[in-house]
Image (tube, rainbow, N blue to C red):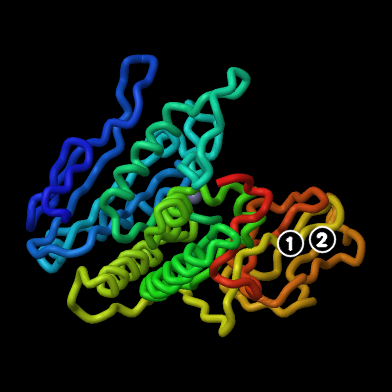
Amino acid sequence: MDDRLTVGNVTAEPGTIQYGRWEALAHPTGHMEFFPVILARGAAPGPCLWLTAGIHGNEQAGPLALYRLISEDLVRRLKGTIVAMPALNPAGLRTMQRAPYHANADPNRFWPEMKGTPAADPDRDPPSSLEQAYQRLYDEIVASADYFIDFHNAWIGSLSFALRDRILYQAGDEADQRRARELADRLDQMVNAYGHTVVNEYPAETYIRENLHRTASGSVLQKSRIPAFTAELGTGLVPDPAIIQAACAGTRNVMRWAGMLDDENEAIEDTRVIRPGYPVRRMRTPRVPEACIVHHLVDAGMRVGKGDVVAEMRDVWGRPVGNGVIRSSHEGIVLGRTHGVYFYPGQPILTMAVRDDGTLIAPYPDTYGKL
Ligand SMILES: [Zn+2]
């Protein structure tokens, strides 16, 4: 099916890597913004894997991972096609900002969702040029993709992990629920093939409230039911070479699982992989009870028990605030520290992976409204 796959101005040719441009949007200064496209097609037919990166401009490890992954040597062994787009937010990458200056919102919340768009309302801003570009790109991804990975970075010093969304289904629709479960099983195999730490996303209510069903991978997964996940690659603006290598190895392992490579699985080395022994989901916790300066005592990858001291709280003179310590609210793994040390009440000082008592499928919450 992918024999003549064309993306932007480039068409896949067996046994080659092709480079091209996907026209994204027009700037008022007359410049066209394009997203670079890399099409790697093996000599033999096989599945189509889409890989994207650079949608958050301050997350710059993903582009490097794609450049390192795609090589002539890989193409010689490849069955099927890789479509790689390493710069989904060129303006943000240039300015090292999460969002581009021309669309002042998180670009990874602009992707299509199950629910249709509301009727035109003159008091609502219409979709930005970038949002429209992602809507068109979504159509291209789901037309050809068998699998999809979107590469990101979390926080300075954070763990490398695969962030897995729960599959949402329509409450009361048994066939939809069964399809969701089948997809959840395939996604489970895919993230385990990647081989890094696996962390589930928030429960469904929070997921919808935070528009995580409108991320690139969330959108492709929920709306088109194509196996997709977000890969978080640690520090964003000073990428860790070991994590980049491990992300390439993990992606090749996904390709082996998908039947795109025939050789042996690679070990994920030189970066921490945590297997807690129970399913985990991300949680922003613990939160500070009052304004203070936080001295973290734990770091990414550490196991923490409920009630363990994870930080000290001080005032601006360095004296203890309250009882002077912050304890973990949950048993789990530290995924990363919140940046900075000055905190207001209620702000979380860590993101942790805590026990996930939920299932890997969930009905759309009632609050989601009519589909
Ligand atoms: Zn990101």
Query: Which element carries disc 2, helix, strand or loop?
Result: strand
Between discs 1 and 2, the one toward the N terminus: 1
Image coordinates of residue 282 in percent, x first then y, are: 61, 64
Disc number placed over residue 313 in the picture, else none: 2
**Residue furthest to the right:** 322
The structure residue drawn at horizontal position 80% and vertical position 58%, both measured from the top left corner, is: 288
Image coordinates of residue 108 in percent, x first then y, are: 49, 44
Badge 2 local density, few (<14 within 10 Å), some, or many (20+)?
Answer: many
- Given contact means CB atoms under 8 Å apart, are the residues at marks 1 and 2 in contact? yes
Figure check: 344 above or below 324: above
Front-lying residue, 200 or 348: 200
Q: Kindly identify which residue carries mark 1.
A: 295
The structure residue drawn at horizontal position 46% and vertical position 42%, both measured from the top left corner, is: 111
Figure check: 105 above or below 327: above
Quadrant of the image containing the N terminus: bottom left
Q: Is residue 238 visible?
A: no
The structure residue drawn at horizontal position 54% and vertical position 24%, both measured from the top left corner, is: 120
Amino acid bearing label 2? Met
